[in-house]
Amino acid sequence: MEKREKIEEIDQIKSLVDTFYGKVKADPLLAPIFENRIKGDWDKHLDKMYRFWQTVLLEEHTYYGSPFTPHASMPIDTKHFERWLELFKTTVNEKFTGEKAKEAIWRAEKMALMFQAKLNYYRENEIYPLK
């Protein structure tokens, strides 16, 4: 088993993101959703995710944008969020330890809940940004 390390710098963020999205690309439920949106431009997506998690976990503000908006029109529901979260938590727990690892999982859980709530609200009310 690989030695787990603390998340302290961008190299650990990149390792987390690369490993996680490697699992996403191989997942029968999530891979088609991501491929349909990313259309093979994984480098651009991964770079955005490096910057997002660097901003969130290392407090180095390199991400600018709204993480929810790109997901608003995607055909995703609870099962997709549950699988995404399962893969994310597995990746973090396999590779990392410490407070930042715990924070990464906590933030991912909160983000999944918030995204689902917003998606449900927009869908139930048939309002922007889904139209």
Image: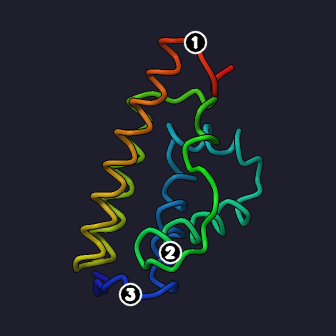
127 to 51, vertically: above or below: above
- The residue singled out by tag 2 in the image is 54
Q: Is residue 44 left or right of residue 74?
A: right
Within 10 Å of disc 3 (Cα), the crowding (few <14, some 14-19, many 20+) is some
Mark positioned earlier in the residue sequence (2 or 1): 2
* Spot occupied by residue 111 in the image (x, y as percentages of width and height): 39, 48
Q: What amino acid type is highlighted by mark number 2?
A: Gln
Q: What amino acid type is highlighted by mark number 3?
A: Glu
Q: Is residue 76 left or right of residue 5?
A: right
Q: Nearer the viewer, mark 3 or mark 1?
A: 1
Mark positioned earlier in the residue sequence (3 or 2): 3
Placement of the C terminus among the 4 image quadrants: top right
Mark positioned earlier in the residue sequence (3 or 1): 3
> SS of the residue at dot 1?
loop
52 to 31, vertically: above or below: below
- Between residue 118 and residue 78, name the one nearer to us: 118
For the point 72% across and 48% down, the residue is: 38
Question: Disc number at residue 126?
Answer: 1
* Spot occupied by residue 5 in the image (x, y as percentages of width and height): 31, 86
Pick out the residue farthest to the top: 125
For the point 60% across and 74% down, the residue is: 62
* Spot occupied by residue 16 in the image (x, y as percentages of width and height): 45, 72
- The residue singled out by tag 3 in the image is 8
Q: Quadrant of residue 130?
A: top right
* Spot occupied by residue 78 in the image (x, y as percentages of width and height): 38, 29
Q: CA distance from mark 2 to mark 1?
A: 34 Å
Mark 2 vs 1: CB contact within 8 A: no
> SS of the residue at dot 2?
helix
- Between residue 29 and residue 43, name the one nearer to us: 43
